[in-house]
Image (cartoon, rainbow, N blue to C red):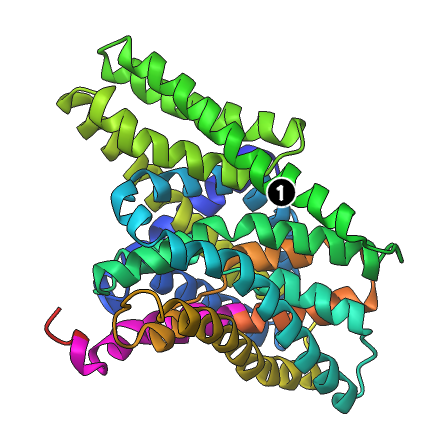
């Protein structure tokens, strides 16, 4: 199939599944689309027992989509910018202590807790997975996914302060997650020694360099937006900011995700207030909301279809079920320890630990990172378990987050 045919197929499926969800299931759009795609995939797998050619054809079509490239080098920059564009910088500043601590310390804590738990669980189940590989697994599954988090929070009534904390953390923890993933890849796959200096250099290049670069391109875009009053030109400028900025960030080896988040925050706050007319604001918002909705739908269709090309066994499925409480416990530890310290200095809403633990969703980024690993037996184990965790996270955690909020008495009236 050509690239156009593949894109046409995915957009068509996303549109059909969105329509079916709206008419029948009436679930949050992203969750409903993924559930329908997952059910269709399972139906094709079941049909494969009677007509093997049908399942094989569907699997071959799915394999033609490079999930890692499609997300990490395609959709991610648009989705991150759209998510950051509507976050109030003042709200973010008010929660900077919680967000910064969780984005930095939380990922590292979760990586070690989950990696240790999964190491012993894999040994008990008879899988050969070294401790370095288990920590690598922890690095790719620990960062919360900004696409899944922001997409679901938009349709979930969560108190504003907690919404800012959860979405803000998810937007910024990619830098730490990428550093952890690169370091553990070098250790687990390349057999290299990781020094403090090497880790510090990676962090400066990826996270700090990405933030500085994002601020620079955001400021440049703001100056251009301010100098013209034509919404068509200004929408094109924001599009160039995202695509050109992300591509250039990758070329100079800084974190593209962090750069686009910072640029989105700058554009959505300073740029919106001082560089756009009211007409431009409306058109920019409409454009990016539409981009966000379309790409979210396509991404969650892809996640649902990915089960067609994964190698599952009963033992791997059981391992995935064991990994779910492991990642939830790791998330709880990574939230509870920093929040307990922060509470000594400032008041935080009741239920912060419970809601942030359950609201720390995993999504397509974890699947994409797992797919980026070189072919090996370890990769197949990590990929299958990652998929199970992601499906549970989006379907179960995503659907029940609002109910959990209602169980906290202090938040019922908010």
> Where the N terminus falls, by quadrant?
top right
185 over 348 or under it: above or below: above
Q: Which residue is mark 1?
A: 69
255 over 320 or under it: above or below: above
Residue at 23%, 83% (x, y): give it.
407
Residue 119, picture quadrant: bottom right
Measuring from the top left, give residue 405's x and y in whole percent.
Answer: 25, 75
Question: Over which residues does the magenta segment extend?
Answer: 390-410
Q: Between residues 317 and 20, which one lies in front from this camera angle?
A: 317
Residue 141, picture quadrant: bottom right
Left or right, 330 with respect to 290, comes to right
Left or right, 172 with respect to 49, comes to left
The answer to whether residue 74 is visible is no
Residue at 21%, 64% (x, y): give it.
159
Indicate yes or no whether the magenta region holds residue 393.
Answer: yes
Q: Is the residue marked by circle 1 packed among few (<14), some (14-19), or many (20+) residues within 10 Å?
A: some
Q: Between residues 397 and 218, which one lies in front from this camera angle?
A: 218
């Amino acid at each position: 199939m050509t690239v156009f045919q593949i894109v046409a197929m995915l957009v068509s499926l996303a549109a059909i599944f969105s329509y079916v969800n709206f008419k029948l299931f009436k679930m949050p759009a992203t969750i409903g689309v993924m559930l329908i795609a997952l059910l269709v995939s399972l139906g094709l797998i079941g049909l494969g027992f009677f007509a093997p050619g049908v399942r094989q054809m569907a699997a071959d079509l799915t394999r033609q989509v490079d999930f890692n490239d499609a997300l990490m080098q395609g959709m991610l920059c648009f989705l991150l910018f759209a998510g950051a564009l509507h976050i109030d910088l003042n709200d973010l500043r008010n929660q900077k202590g919680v967000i910064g601590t969780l984005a930095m310390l939380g990922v590292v804590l979760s990586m070690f807790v989950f990696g240790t738990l999964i190491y012993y669980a894999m040994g008990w189940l008879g899988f050969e997975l070294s401790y370095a590989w288990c920590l690598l697994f922890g690095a790719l599954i620990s960062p919360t996914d900004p696409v899944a988090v922001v997409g679901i929070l938009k349709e979930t009534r969560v108190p504003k302060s907690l919404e800012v904390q959860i979405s803000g953390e998810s937007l910024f923890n990619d830098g730490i997650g990428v550093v952890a993933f690169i370091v553990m890849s070098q250790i687990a796959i390349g057999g290299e020694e990781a020094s403090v200096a090497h880790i510090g250099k990676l962090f400066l290049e990826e996270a700090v360099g990405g933030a500085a670069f994002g601020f620079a391109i955001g400021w440049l875009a703001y100056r251009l937006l301010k100098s013209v009053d034509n919404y068509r030109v200004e929408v094109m400028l924001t599009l160039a900011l995202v695509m050109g900025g992300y591509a250039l960030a990758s070329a100079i080896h800084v974190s593209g995700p962090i750069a686009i988040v910072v640029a989105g925050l700058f554009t959505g706050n300073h740029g919106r207030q001082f560089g756009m007319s009211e007409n431009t604001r409306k058109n920019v918002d409409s454009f990016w909301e539409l981009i966000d909705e379309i790409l979210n739908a396509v991404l969650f269709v892809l996640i649902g279809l990915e089960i067609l090309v994964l190698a599952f066994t009963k033992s791997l499925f059981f391992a995935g079920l064991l990994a779910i409480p492991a990642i939830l416990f790791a998330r709880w530890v990574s939230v509870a320890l920093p929040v307990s310290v922060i509470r000594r200095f400032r008041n935080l809403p009741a239920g912060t630990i419970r809601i942030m633990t359950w609201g720390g969703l995993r999504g397509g980024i974890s699947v994409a990172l797992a797919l980026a690993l070189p072919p090996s037996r370890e990769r197949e184990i990590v990929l299958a378990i990652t998929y199970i965790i992601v499906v549970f996270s989006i379907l179960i955690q995503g659907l029940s987050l609002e109910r959990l909020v209602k169980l906290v008495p202090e938040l019922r009236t908010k």
